[in-house]
Image (cartoon, rainbow, N blue to C red):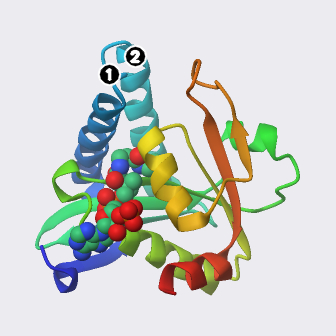
Amino acid sequence: MTETDLRISIVTEPDMLEVSDLLEKTITAAFVYEGIAESNAVELRHEISGKIDELKRFLREQPAGEHWLAAQSGDKIVGVIASGEPTEIIQRHLPDLGDTPEIKNAYVHPDYQSHGVGTRLFMAMLRRLRDYQVAQFVLDTGYSAAQKYWTRRLGPPEMSLQDYWGPGFPHVIWRCLVTEAIDRATS
Ligand SMILES: CC(C)(COP(=O)(O)OP(=O)(O)OC[C@H]1O[C@@H](n2cnc3c(N)ncnc32)[C@H](O)[C@@H]1OP(=O)(O)O)[C@@H](O)C(=O)NCCC(=O)NCCS
């Protein structure tokens, strides 16, 4: 896969099965990587079905202010990213958000990770939010690998909920200006 080979587009109904499959594979691989797949088998199924339900709801209702983008290499969808209403954890800990969206569901197929797909998707989503006059966004994660990934891109998080997922497993939340995140990513 080359950089120029990658196409970013809006997720539409015909993509449903392929994106669902991508979510299942990527979330399973992330749980395995974190060493929690066996001890959290029920949570893993719940996480996958929750994300697929979110995708189906988006395709069915097309809510204003919600976006799903896909990265395609050849005829294969290799990654997705979304934005929309912040999850309950974020809303509970940052009650003053107003209509600030969350950038969420950044998932790149395990075979295509570390080739710049996530960065391309993130940039495309930032530009889309800027085009929609969105000033700031929030983003959160409980995965330790993703915490390092986003800290490299966004700096230290605004909030780190220590031991949220068990001793030594924090949940972290960022709140960032869209323009600053674009500048940071392109500098
Ligand atoms: C987190 C995730 C979305 C990142 O996507 P990705 O495509 O792997 O990310 P990128 O390739 O853009 O960046 C990863 C690394 O590859 C490097 N990279 C970027 N372009 C590259 C290229 N063309 N060739 C080689 N390496 C490259 C980047 O510099 C980056 O390293 P850094 O983080 O030390 O700066 C992806 O790994 C993933 O789906 N993880 C599992 C699920 C998850 O945790 N999702 C996030 C939930 S919040």
Q: Which residue is mark 1?
A: 37
Q: Residues within 10 Å of mark 1 (few under 14, many from 20)?
A: some
Answer yes or no: disc 1 within 8 Å of ligand 1: no
Question: Which three-letter amino acid code belongs to the residue tagged 1?
Answer: Ala
Location of ligand 1 given as a quarter of the image: bottom left
Mark 2 touching mark 1, by CB under 8 A? yes
Which residue is labeled 2 in the image?
40
Residue 172 visible in the displayed image: yes
Q: Position of residue 23 (x, y in %)?
A: 31, 44
For this rendering, which residue is in front, 185 or 105? 185
Q: Is residue 70 visible?
A: no
Residue 30 placement, left or right of 174: left
Q: List x then y, in percent, for residue 129.
A: 60, 76
Left or right: 67 as drawn, with respect to 55: right
* Relative to 159, 182 lies left or right: left
Residue density around tag 2, few if under 14, some if 14–19, many if 20 or more, within 10 Å: few
Q: Return the residue found at the far right.
A: 96
